[in-house]
Amino acid sequence: MTVDLQADIADWVPDLRVHRLDAGHWVPISHPEVVARHVREFIAQAAQPLG
């Protein structure tokens, strides 16, 4: 998704997390380790109890 398309997305998505990568369209194919790390970090944070 281009940066222009992301401009107002924070208004619609609470707790938005954006990671910009210098990569092309197929990020999961070209940078699988980076995608996996971000997914692991997201899951670890989401699994934390609220409060």
Image: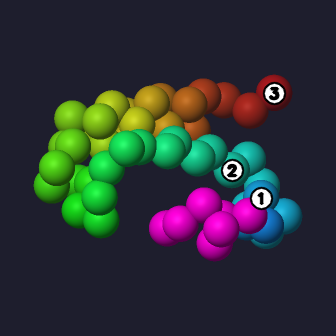
Mark 1 is surrounded, within 10 Å at the Cα level, by few (under 14), some (14 to 19) or many (20 or more) other residues, namely: few
Image point (37%, 44%), residue name: 22
- Confirm whether the magenta stretch covers residue 17: no
> What amino acid is found at the position of numbered circle 2 in the picture?
Leu
Return the residue at label 3: 51
Q: Position of residue 28 (x, y in %)?
A: 23, 54
Give x and y (percent) for residue 47. Answer: 54, 34
Q: Which residues are magenta?
A: 1-7
CA gap, disc 3 to disc 2?
A: 18 Å
Look at the image and tell me whether residue 31 can be seen: yes
Instruction: Point out the residue furthest to the bottom here.
Output: 5
Q: Quadrant of residue 11?
A: bottom right
- Image-quadrant location for residue 10: bottom right
Amino acid on which the number 3 mark rests in the picture: Gly
Taking 2 as reference, is 39 left or right?
A: left
- Looking at the rendered structure, the kind of residue marked 1 is Ala
Check whether the beta carbons of the residues at disc 3 and disc 1 lie within 8 A of each other. Answer: no
> Which one is closest to the eye, mark 3 or mark 1?
1
Quadrant in the picture for the C terminus: top right
Give whichever of discs 3 and 2 has the lower sequence position. Answer: 2
- Residue identified by numbered label 2: 16
Residue designated by label 1: 10
